[in-house]
Image (cartoon, rainbow, N blue to C red):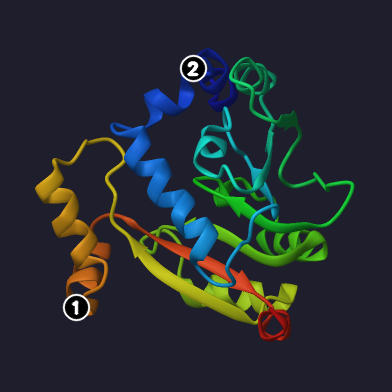
């Protein structure tokens, strides 16, 4: 079975099935989309590339959410839930008008040419690009260099310790949230699990906000 067949067969209820605690995971992700790097304000447009069924939309009520996914089945599943998702490949898609924020989650590895993709995104994104990064798969310095080449000279990075496949109890969730703020503990955990959340932006644009 191909990757795309897997996504097509699992499109209905994707967000609920992809995360052990979808509400916790997506709410924490959405909070960082709003606040990491330049802050979003009500009415700002968030373009979510490779969005699946657009589950993130439910946690960004003050922003205008537009999702893009290559799977027709995902687009259909999103439509059944009233989410604004269109079909398109993240490598080629370009919105009709600039957006304030672009996001890519669990999909950076789908870039045919990462530097070219980042440059394309920089051309239509006014405030920031928010994405997750597995430091055991990609070197942060390499990604930072690609971001700078694309025009994003500002980068804010934060550990993101919310389990995807295991639902943490309240006590564990609090401990993990605390560990995100402790440098040595965070670096130790990131050697074996979890990801960074990254917000890339232009420093001159940040000074104007």
Q: Position of residue 129 (x, y in %)?
A: 63, 62
Say above or below: 34 vs 20.
below
Q: Position of residue 78 (x, y in %)?
A: 62, 23
Q: Nearer the viewer, residue 75 or 97?
A: 97
Residue topped by disc 1? 184
The residue under the point 74% across, 38% down is 89
The residue under the point 39% across, 29% down is 18
Q: Position of residue 67 (x, y in %)?
A: 67, 37
Q: In which quarter of the view is residue 160 placed?
A: bottom left
Using residue 4 as the reference point, say whether residue 113 is left or right of it: right
Disc 2, SS: loop
Using residue 104 as the reference point, say whether residue 15 is left or right of it: left
Disc 1, SS: helix
Mark 2 to mark 1 CA distance (whole Å): 38 Å
Residue topped by disc 2? 10
Q: Position of residue 144 (x, y in %)?
A: 56, 76
Total numbered badges shown on the rendered structure: 2
Using residue 109 as the reference point, say whether residue 44 is left or right of it: right
Q: In which quarter of the view is residue 183 placed?
A: bottom left
């Amino acid at each position: 079975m191909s990757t795309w067949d897997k996504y097509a067969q699992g499109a209905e209820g994707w967000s609920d099935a992809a995360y052990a605690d979808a509400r916790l995971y997506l709410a924490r992700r959405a909070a960082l989309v709003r606040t990491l790097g330049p802050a979003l304000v009500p009415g700002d447009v968030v373009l979510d590339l490779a969005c699946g069924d657009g589950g993130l939309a439910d946690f960004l009520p003050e922003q205008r959410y537009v999702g893009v996914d290559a799977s027709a089945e995902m687009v259909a599943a999103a439509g059944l839930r009233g989410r604004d998702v269109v079909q398109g490949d993240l490598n080629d898609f370009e919105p009709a008008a600039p957006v304030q924020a672009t996001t890519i989650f669990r999909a950076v590895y789908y870039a045919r040419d990462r530097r070219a993709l980042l440059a394309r995104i920089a051309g239509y994104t006014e405030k920031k690009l928010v994405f997750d990064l597995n430091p055991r798969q990609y070197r942060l310095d390499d990604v930072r260099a690609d971001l700078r080449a694309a025009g994003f000279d500002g980068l804010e990075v934060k550990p993101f310790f919310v389990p995807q496949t295991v639902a943490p109890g309240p006590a564990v969730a609090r401990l993990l949230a605390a560990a995100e703020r402790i440098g040595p503990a965070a670096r130790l955990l990131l050697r074996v699990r979890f990801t960074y959340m990254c917000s890339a932006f232009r420093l001159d644009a940040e000074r104007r906000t």
